[in-house]
């Protein structure tokens, strides 16, 4: 099937897969856990409102056309590239007492009191957690006991595909970053044509309530891939996401390139992100998205052993993915109009492929939320032929309850097989020793050809380990 050829400007606006985001440090300071209400949002190393990429030349303005724009949208001229923050924030619009439960998830456990959580009991923000703490050591043992074979691949070197030419051409790795390779268990599309599995990454942030307000006004829900360091910083906002009927998934603790980490470091990144979500919401997510889409069969296997399904985003050719590029506005490598042209081309491709689709967007910065609520979401709602917008779990034909360990009854949507236990809270942040890579055996079924990946709801690899009863037995060790 021949897909529309992007115009030169659009092609330039779609970065290569290995570097679809600028090298900004991961964002946000620690807080007492309450929702932020100020109009500033700091990123380590950068002052609010200060250009972070002043060496870039003026970005081009390109032509775009959308079927609808929010009448209250921030003008594109006010969505400024190269700054950390431009707009005010709402803060959490609703707070929930401890013990609250979401109406859309039957038998959901009562939500904890986030105010009892102490950031001192979690790893340092925005750094890969140490691997020598008792908590991480238990998770390492859980992975070893899971029955999932971990491929014996060495970590990749920082620098992406150019720094790893031999590995980039090794189909055994199934390295999505360099080849677009997907495993049979990767979720990259929705099965029904013109269905959009709406996703936002890297929050919660002070700007997430602005997005949630638009969701509420338009009866929308989506999937949020949450960074552990942001969750412990803004737990009230995460609870608002969850209680509003959105799906919550993990997005690691500090947002690293996962293939560059040792097995133990991968386990620490995933384990702490799962744990803090459970500590705030009372439920354990069964899904994750690799930062930058950086995943190979080694990382996939570890995620599977920890009870997580891998969700990426739609990719229709080696150079064309359903990535809006919105994150690159704060990095000053793309203009708002280029993001809208990307979106216009995504919609063009969405009408041609035979499946639904998943798009990469972010709720981290003011600019990314402004683009979503002012332009992208209104355009999607007005698009013809009509789109159906859903969280990923629902676009796959399942319910929100199927997305969490405690509420998945293992009938309609089988649990990822693992013996991973989210043990009781550690008494402090983890230690400092670094462990070496380990692992054995080889990976699972892969699709090295790239292109529009299959939906992969059969859980072939996920069913290849410990019986589901073992997972449920592990509930005895959960909080």
Image (cartoon, rainbow, N blue to C red):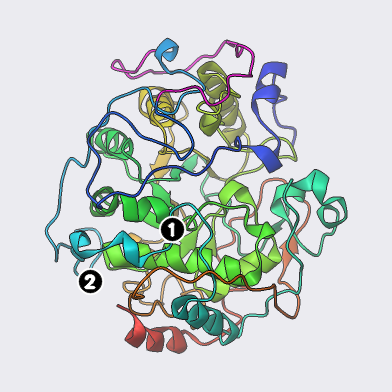
38 or 178, which lies in front?
Answer: 38
Q: Position of residue 365 (x, y in %)?
A: 41, 33
Category of crowding for the residue at label 1, using alpha-carbon neighbours closer than 10 angstroms: few (below 14), some (14–19), many (at least 20): some
Residue appearing at x 44%, y 35% in the figure:
387
Query: Which stretch is magenta?
Result: 49-75
Q: Magenta residues: mostly which secondary structure?
A: loop
The residue tagged 1 is 124
70 or 133, which lies in front?
Answer: 133
Q: Is residue 364 left or right of residue 174?
A: left
Residue appearing at x 56%, y 87% in the figure:
145
Q: Is residue 180 left or right of residue 398?
A: right
Q: Is residue 377 at all visible to an observer of this figure?
A: no
Does label 1 or label 2 sit earlier along the sequence?
2
Tell me the quadrant of the picture where the C terminus can be found: bottom left
Residue 466, quarter of picture = bottom right
Circle 2 sits in a helix, a strand or a loop, which is it?
Answer: loop
Residue appearing at x 63%, y 55% in the figure:
454
Would you say the residues marked 1 and 2 are in contact, meaning their CB atoms lie under 8 Å apart?
A: no
Q: Position of residue 376 (x, y in %)?
A: 44, 27
Q: Is residue 477 left or right of residue 182?
A: left
Q: Is residue 60 magenta?
A: yes
Q: Position of residue 303 (x, y in %)?
A: 56, 68
The residue tagged 2 is 109
Residue appearing at x 37%, y 45% in the figure:
29
Q: Is residue 235 left or right of residue 178?
A: left
Q: Is residue 59 magenta?
A: yes
Q: How many marks?
A: 2
Q: Position of residue 84 (x, y in %)?
A: 44, 28
Q: Is residue 146 at all visible to an observer of this figure?
A: yes
Give the vertical position of 46 relative to 164 (above or below): above
Give the vertical position of 114 relative to 406 (above or below): above
């Amino acid at each position: 099937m021949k897909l529309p050829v992007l115009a030169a400007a659009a092609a330039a606006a779609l970065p290569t897969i290995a570097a679809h985001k600028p090298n900004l440090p991961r964002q946000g300071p620690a807080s007492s856990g309450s929702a932020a209400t100020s109009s500033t949002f700091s990123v380590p190393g950068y002052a609010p409102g200060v250009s972070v990429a002043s060496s870039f030349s003026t970005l081009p303005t390109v032509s775009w056309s959308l079927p609808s724009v929010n009448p209250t949208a921030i003008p594109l001229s006010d969505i400024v590239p190269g700054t950390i923050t431009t707009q005010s924030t709402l803060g959490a619009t609703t707070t929930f007492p401890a013990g609250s439960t979401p109406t859309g998830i039957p038998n959901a456990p009562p939500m904890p009191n986030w105010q009892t959580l102490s950031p001192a009991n979690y790893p340092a923000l925005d750094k890969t957690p140490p691997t020598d703490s008792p908590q991480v050591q238990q998770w390492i043992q859980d992975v070893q006991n899971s029955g999932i074979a971990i491929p014996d691949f060495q970590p990749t070197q920082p620098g992406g595909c150019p720094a790893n030419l031999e590995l980039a051409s090794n189909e055994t790795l199934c390295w999505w970053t360099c080849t677009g390779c997907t495993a049979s268990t990767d979720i990259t599309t929705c099965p029904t044509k013109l269905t959009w599995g709406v996703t936002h990454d890297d929050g919660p942030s002070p700007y997430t309530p602005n997005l949630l307000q638009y969701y509420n006004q338009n009866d929308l829900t989506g999937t949020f891939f949450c960074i552990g360091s942001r969750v412990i910083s803004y737990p009230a906002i995460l609870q608002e996401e969850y209680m509003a009927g959105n799906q919550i998934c993990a997005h690691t603790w500090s947002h690293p390139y996962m293939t560059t980490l040792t097995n133990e470091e991968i386990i620490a990144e995933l384990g702490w992100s799962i744990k803090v979500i459970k500590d705030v919401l009372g439920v354990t997510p069964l899904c994750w998205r690799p930062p930058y889409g950086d995943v190979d069969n080694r990382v996939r296997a570890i995620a599977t052993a920890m009870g997580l399904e891998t969700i990426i985003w739609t990719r229709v050719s080696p150079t064309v993915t359903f990535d809006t590029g919105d994150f690159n506005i704060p990095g000053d490598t793309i203009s708002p109009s280029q993001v809208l042209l990307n979106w216009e081309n995504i919609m063009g491709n969405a009408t041609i492929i035979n499946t639904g689709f998943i798009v990469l967007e972010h709720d981290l910065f003011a600019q990314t939320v402004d683009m979503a609520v002012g332009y992208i979401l209104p355009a999607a709602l007005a698009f013809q032929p009509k789109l159906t917008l859903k969280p990923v779990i629902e676009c796959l034909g399942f319910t929100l309850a199927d997305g969490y360990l405690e509420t998945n009854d293992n009938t309609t949507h089988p649990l990822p097989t693992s013996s991973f236990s989210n043990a009781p809270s550690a008494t402090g942040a983890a230690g400092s020793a670094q462990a070496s890579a380990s692992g054995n055996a080889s990976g699972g079924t892969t699709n090295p050809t790239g292109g529009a990946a299959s939906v992969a709801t059969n859980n072939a690899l996920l069913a290849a380990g410990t019986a589901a009863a073992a997972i449920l037995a592990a509930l005895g060790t959960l909080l």
